[in-house]
Amino acid sequence: MAYEAEETRYSSMHYNRCGRSGLRLPAISLGLWHNFGGVDSGKTSRAMVLGAFDLGITHFDLANNYGPPAGSAEESFGHILSQDLKSYRDQLVVSTKAGYYMWPGPYGEWGSRKYLVSSLDQSLRRLGLDYVDIFYHHRPDPETPLEETMGALDHIVRNGKALYAGVSNYGPEQLQQAAAILKSLGTPCLIHQPAYNMFNRRPEEGLIQALTTENIGCISFSPLAQGLLTDKYLGGIPEGSRATKPHGALKPAQITEERLAKVRALNQLALARGQTLAQLALVWVLRHPIMTSALIGASKVAQLEDAVGAVNNLSLSAEELQAIEGILQ
Ligand SMILES: NC(=O)c1ccc[n+]([C@@H]2O[C@H](COP(=O)([O-])OP(=O)(O)OC[C@H]3O[C@@H](n4cnc5c(N)ncnc54)[C@H](OP(=O)(O)O)[C@@H]3O)[C@@H](O)[C@H]2O)c1
């Protein structure tokens, strides 16, 4: 059946300004790292993308290597774009990235101009798009001069193949150097994409401060620690969950009794606030003023509905924050 977007889709989502830019992103964005590849059900992928858009999620995050197989998430999303979302293109923010291994030989990964420009051309073909909204360098390259990598991002934006440039997995100093180079080229760094959640607090060691100082937006990936920060693993590892999939990045060994004890206590705290644990985990990530969006993954539309419910209560009291600290110690 022809898709028509829900008319009320913009009524409850919050759209946060990304740093000092003109772009606003939804407080909750959807990433297509897992569950949108060639190995996954196209019907479910479509239901999730359209369901997300109906809930006000305007931002969809991809990378060249998402699948499996690598590239297939961009193909699946491209299919949904052409079949269902063509007339909504200007209401969507689509991002992709390059940095990890994509093809054999010396030009298929890291941060050379050769790799980044070729990879984005491939991504655009798979997506069936003329441009993406945000193009990221996916991880720092210890060997390529940062001037070359940032020069490639600037070139890509100037050529109209991306509207904005961003970086991912950069440390605070690398981020500041990259931002300074981009600024000197006249293409500002729009956004940084780090991992951040209650179990991974590395961005608190300088990165959030650097982003705040530079006024660069931040979108945190894996805010639910790949599902650990929900109630799903409290009764064991459910069939079909990420931890049971051979290509899933969450391994059963990561679901330790020590972590589950914390998850149980956090779950009680969430319920006392009238929220689910997933919602509390998202509110906790979004508490920093510089945090533009929490970038979730999902395997079901119900998980998206759960996540967007977080925006109904985004405030955390000092006592609640302290209680969370106590649990996470
Ligand atoms: N830049 C980078 O290097 C990088 C790296 C990783 C990810 N990312 C981006 O971040 C996005 C999100 O990463 P992620 O998928 O790890 O995020 P996440 O939100 O931490 O985890 C998503 C998983 O949690 C489970 N889940 C979500 N909502 C739930 C709910 N309400 N109740 C119970 N379980 C729930 C689902 O697992 P089940 O499948 O088990 O149901 C879902 O697949 C990726 O798609 C990608 O766009 C970027």
Image (cartoon, helix red, strand yellow):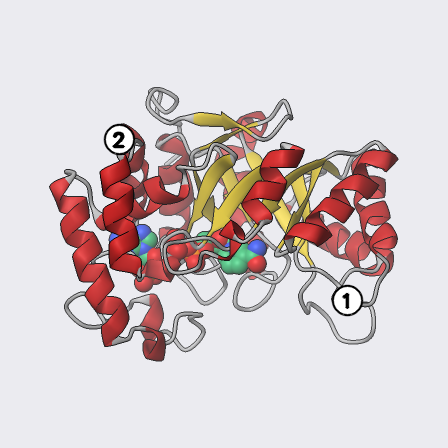
The residue shown at (87%, 36%) is 185
Work out whether 319 lies above or below 12.
below
Residue 324 in picture, x, y percent from top left? 27, 50
Q: Residues within 10 Å of mark 1 (few under 14, many from 20)?
A: few
Residue 93's disc is: none
The CA span between labels 1 and 2 is: 41 Å
- Residue 232 visible in the displayed image: no
Picture layout, residue 284 above or below residue 238: above
Quarter of the image for residue 251 reads bottom left
- Residue with the mark numbered 2: 313
Which quarter of the figure is the N terminus placed in? top left
Q: SS class of the residue under badge 2? A: loop
Reading the image, the residue beneath label 1 is 142
Is residue 13 among the parts visible in the rendering? yes
At 78% from the left and 60% from the top, the residue drawn is: 111
**Nearer-N-terminus badge (1/2):** 1
Of residues 67 and 320, which is closer to you in this image? 320
In the image, taking residue 39 as reference, residue 311 lies left or right, namely: left
Disc 1 secondary structure class? loop
Rendered location of residue 9, percent (x, y): 36, 25
